[in-house]
Image (spheres, rainbow, N blue to C red):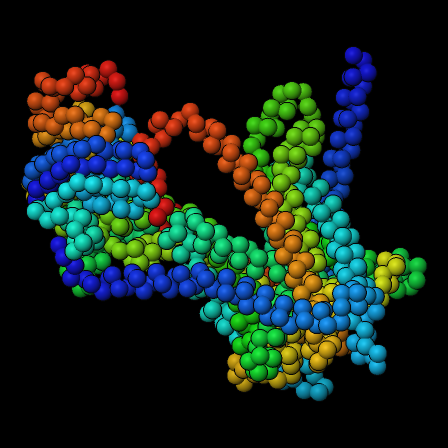
Amino acid sequence: MKSIYGFVHVREKLMRGLFLACALFSVVALATITVFLLANGLPFIAEIGLGEFFGTRWAPLSDTPAYGILSMLVASLYVTALSVLIGVGIGLLTAICLYKFCPRWLVSPIRQMVNLLSGIPSVIFGLFGMTVIVPFIRDYISPSGVGYGILSSALVLGIMILPTIVSVSLDAMQAVPGSYFEGALALGSTREQATFRVMLPAAKSGILAGVVLAVGRAIGETMAVIMVVGNSPEMPVSLFQSVRTLTANIALGATEMKGDPERALIATGVVLFVFTLLLNTSFSLLKRDKTEKDDRKSRRKGKNSTPVAPAKPGSAKEAQS
Amino acid sequence: MNISVRNCNLWYGDFQALKNINMDISNREVTAFIGPSGCGKSTFLKILNRMNDLVDGCRITGSFHIGGVDIFDKSTDVNLLRKKVGMVFQKPNPFPMSIYDNIAFAPRTFGVRKKAELDRIVEDSLRRASIWDEVKDRLKKSALGMSGGQQQRLCIARALAANPDILLMDEPTSALDPISTGKIEALMSELKQELTIVIVTHNMQQATRIADKTAFFYLGELIEYDTTEKLFSCPTDRRTENYITGRFG
Amino acid sequence: MNSKRETGRGSRTLFSGLKYLCILCTVVSVAALVAVVFYILKNGIGKLSWQLLFGEYTGSAVSIFPAFIGTLRLIVIAVLIAVPVGIFSAVYLVEYMNNKGKLVKVIRIAAETLAGIPSIVYGLFGYLIFVRTFQWGYSLLGGGITLAIMILPVIIRSTEESLLAVPDGFREGSLALGAGKVRTIFRIVLPSAASGIVTAVILAVGRIISESAVLILTLGMVVNLIPSSVLSPGTSLALDIYYFASHGYPDEAAATSVVLLLMVILLNLLATGLGKLIKRRQGE
């Protein structure tokens, strides 16, 4: 029974190595990105000092250059907060409607449409904003007669993140066991009460994850914003004023600047990167929290059945290998 | 080929699933393993083609010889061992491909490439599993479109295509209806002319119908092992008697 | 007793009101999304012309033909890198590591983090490494590799899910027939997972053609030249839209949007359709 197919073993080893190398690619890529950004960005921040870097004046090409990104940081936060408010507000309520209050036959077509629309390129949303929303705001809403700005950007981004919010929240609510709903009805709740008081809280961790996702998309979005936000690096004081976000700052300048201004942009990228890392961490903490709770629950349940449990560990486990 | 097992112990982590089992299984006979769930009979079966190798934290001691060869020896190729010792599972598991490709999978694994030879092996294996007449017109169709009983016989044919000396069957009929079960039992009696069959079953009537020898497992121990007739008519151990008379299990 | 019932009724009215608000929101969101699509189609379709699609880019007449070529090359480069690496990563995580252990955790965290990085930061990275450090200048290859890293987490994640959905019986069956692990993976597990993987790859292609922020920093946005090699600078359809919109060609921007939109929708339909087709052929 000695192997005459020795090459099989060599092949197994080689392929395993190849699979491992591919699996490590993500880690290497992430490490490279982190190192490149930090190595290029942090020294610059250290050089000019945190105070200057988080100052309000951004004038990299003037005779007395200043590299303060505070106004853009604030603008980014404003745009993100407002767009998430719009997107999550409308998206979540839409998801609730699709979940319980909408005629059955309408749910699937709307859902498919929403899924399809979640793939629309952001630059198209930008174009829509530039040619429809900005003129509309300029002509009918803005007191200053400026259409570009935070409100336009927030509206464009709000529409853009809608599909994501709807899908994620609907998934989260549909994952809640239907028996909760029936239980609530059995206690005399109306359909509406059961939905808002029972199903919605039960799905909250999934919905929260969707919100975090939306925040990440909104703060990181470049093209849709760059086309409607106006791009003046000024401290935002009004919804109708041309401002610039961190992402727009990078996209506008990186291809044209050299030397210190370029390093300033990389440092801007570092700020954005750190921001998304924080967001990611909170996202995974959120998820971990949930799975741990689930684990604990199942472990408690499992206790009674331990004497039987080892009966067939073979079939259950080996299968996965 | 004879199977000979000495001092077999097996642990899953800290849990000892098999305790000091000694057993000889003779060539061209049907041997049945019976016992309540969790008694270790499936685990023991899976040692014989080393499917337990895949389980995390599984530790085995003892000596295991098939046809005189130590199956855990360093020089033993586990893939060739599994070719020699075929296995049929509790739930029919045809691959999501055509009937033909299912049967041809093992020969192709071991280097058969010629179309004519593959055709011959496929037809031969399907005939041996007495399913040829039912499927000969749809060899290119997906195996997943067959009924459960047909799927299980296809899996037997697939195992036969590797030309094994021993066939291990892990409750092969527990998921099937009585008619399909009957067909598979008839098939086993035919197959034992040419190979050794070891079957795990929950069904004591099945053991009496098809097995030449029967082994009773309980809580990881081999309690009694004898000819089927003797084990069911005058068991020597109280636990065997209690089990076969239906007092537990 | 009486007041309690009153409260109940109050809450009922409140929630009924909320229900109508929900319905209103649904109408608003559906209307907003339909408006975007409708507006783009209405404004763009009339502006489509042979010159714009396949003509030569001259001073007087623009064309998106160079963008077609650029987009196509970007897709090929990114897919050639990300698909094998992504699938093999998932194979390692699921088939070899059983989705358990420290290493798996590290890889998973890395992939999740990659998925959360904004595309402009990818662009900045691509610029730093390919344009600056490697001295390639703006190039399709640099842009394509950056895009590959960007879609990698998506491919890993969906391949993992498809692999986990493959019944363990298939793996056991194959191993019990004497097939080795590698043969089991390539002949049984991956083909069984094919429908999910194919869908994921097509959706990833959709992301590639939608992306513009990465490319603005790595590709050079050279809209008028057909790239001669993978190391040439170039443009993509999405970049062209931005270029046209910001350089005074609103009609061309709208028309290009129609093309891009149709491609994205087509890819989406193709993804579901092809996934279903593969499943049917396997007889499920």
Residue at the spot x=18%, y=37% of the render? Answer: B8
Residue at the spot x=33%, y=63% of the render? Answer: A15
Left or right position of B1 against C237: left
State the image coordinates of residue C109 (x, y, percent, origin top left).
53, 54
- Along the viewing direction, whichever of C283 and C45 lies nearer the viewer: C283
For this orientation, the residue located farthest to the right is A143
Count of numbered circles on the image: 0
- Along the viewing direction, whichever of B161 and B86 lies nearer the viewer: B86
Residue at the spot x=70%, y=72% of the render? Answer: A44
Left or right position of A72 against A276: right
Which quadrant of the structure image shows residue B151? top left
State the image coordinates of residue B101 (x, y, percent, origin top left).
26, 55
- Identify whether A117 is placed above or below A64: above
State the image coordinates of residue A46 (x, y, percent, origin top left).
71, 69
Q: Is residue A153 visible?
A: no
Residue at the spot x=76%, y=52% of the render? Answer: A81
For this orientation, the residue located farthest to the top is C1
- Along the viewing direction, whichever of C135 and A112 lies nearer the viewer: C135
Which quadrant of the structure image shows residue C8? top right
> Which image quarter is the N terminus of chain C in?
top right
Q: Is residue B29 visible?
A: yes
- Identify whether C110 is placed above or below B25: below
State the image coordinates of residue C204 (x, y, percent, origin top left).
53, 62
